Amino acid sequence: MAQNIYDNPDFFSGYSQLPRQVHGLDGAPEWPAVRAMLPALTGKRVADLGCGFGWASRWMRTQGAVSVLGLDLSHNMIARAKADSSDPAIEYRIADLEMLELPEAAFELVYSALTFHYVEDFRRLTRMIHKTLVSGGDLVFTAEHPIFMAAAHPHWIADEDGRKTWPVNGYSVEGERRTDWFAKGVLKYHRTLGTTLNTLIDADFKVRRVEEFAPTREQIEQAPELAEELERPMMLLVSARKTETR
Ligand SMILES: C[S@@+](CC[C@H](N)C(=O)[O-])C[C@H]1O[C@@H](n2cnc3c(N)ncnc32)[C@H](O)[C@@H]1O
């Protein structure tokens, strides 16, 4: 059973104040890079795994998706997503990605933002996603970058010039990692970059693009605190496609 930290009141209240939750997709610096990885959405059926407040689910509809299924473990998240939308073509539902089963060939796009690092059994999940996509369907996701997770904020140390550095701890030791972020002991799962990509390849996905997100110079000029993200990649962005069968 997954941890469901987003239903912890302290965690939820802190998380809700993040710029990306207050301002939506425009408050997420990686969004332009994610958007560039997404296929055309007109006429597509989309599943948004770990949909949170539903910012992306709603955006997909503005881009022509015919339906969006937003799934999330957290009652708080789903309640907020439902409150923010009256679109009958978006369905929000509680679901645990550790156990989720979706119908075969039911979606042209499976999208997920910053959720897969909470999932222990990534192998099962990728196979299930492969099954639920139509032939030629796309999986586009972001997750916490494994280097960021292994160099967990805020455990930085100052170098001799006083600059913050983030030692990487046990990069090759995969599995549970705990962090204190809005609440103590938030549970995440560390997988190396190789494991993540090979799990997709083994599930018969063609990996199309991989980005290790770093802010642009313009973004740093506008929000100088983002400069820190040049020190280690914070997010991994992946697009993969289910090979077309004839
Ligand atoms: C960092 S938030 C991202 C939310 C949204 N995708 C966004 O980008 O704003 C991670 C989300 O994953 C959800 N989550 C974590 N573990 C999950 C699981 N096992 N099954 C389904 N959702 C999960 C959380 O409840 C939370 O809403």
Image (tube, helix red, strand yellow):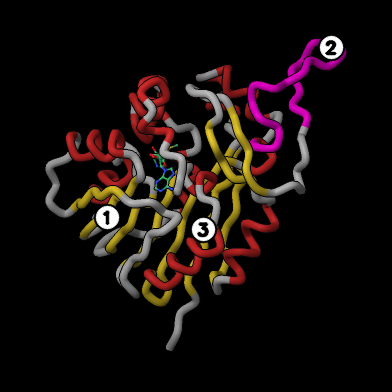
The answer to which image quadrant residue 21 occupies is top left
Q: Which mark is residue 208?
A: none
Q: Which element type, helix, strand or loop, lies under badge 3? A: strand
- The part of the chain drawn in magenta is 149-167
- Quick one: label 3 or label 1, which is nearer the N terminus? 1
Of the residues tagged 3 and 1, which is closer to the observer? 1
**Which quadrant would the C terminus be assigned to in this image?**
bottom left
| Residue type indicated by callout 3 | Ser
Q: Amino acid at mark 1?
A: Leu
Taking 146 as reference, is 221 above or below it? above
At 52% across and 63% down in the image, what residue appears?
240
Q: With respect to residue 159, does 51 lie above or below?
A: below
Q: Quadrant of residue 52?
A: top left
Q: Which residue reaches farthest right?
A: 160
Give above or below for 180 relative to 61: above
Name the residue at 53% across, 26% down. Answer: 219
* Label annotation for residue 239: 3
By secondary structure, the bulk of the magenta-drawn segment is best described as: loop
Q: Residue at x 61, y 69 (%)?
A: 201
Question: Which comes sooner in the sequence, label 2 or label 1?
Answer: 1
Residue 55, position as x, y percentages in the image: 31, 39
**Of residues 157 and 209, the one drawn nearer to the viewer in this rendering:** 157
C-alpha separation, residue under disc 2 versus residue under disc 1: 50 Å
Left/right placement of residue 218 relative to residue 65 reads right
Count neighbours of disc 2 (C-alpha within 10 A) and say few if under 14, some if 14 to 19, many if 20 or more.
Answer: few
- Relative horizontal placement of residue 123, taking residue 230 as reference (left or right): left
Q: Which residue is mark 1?
A: 69
Q: Is residue 158 magenta?
A: yes
Q: Is residue 142 visible?
A: no
Image position of 170 (left or right of 9):
right
The tag on residue 161 is 2
Helix, strand or loop at label 2? It is loop
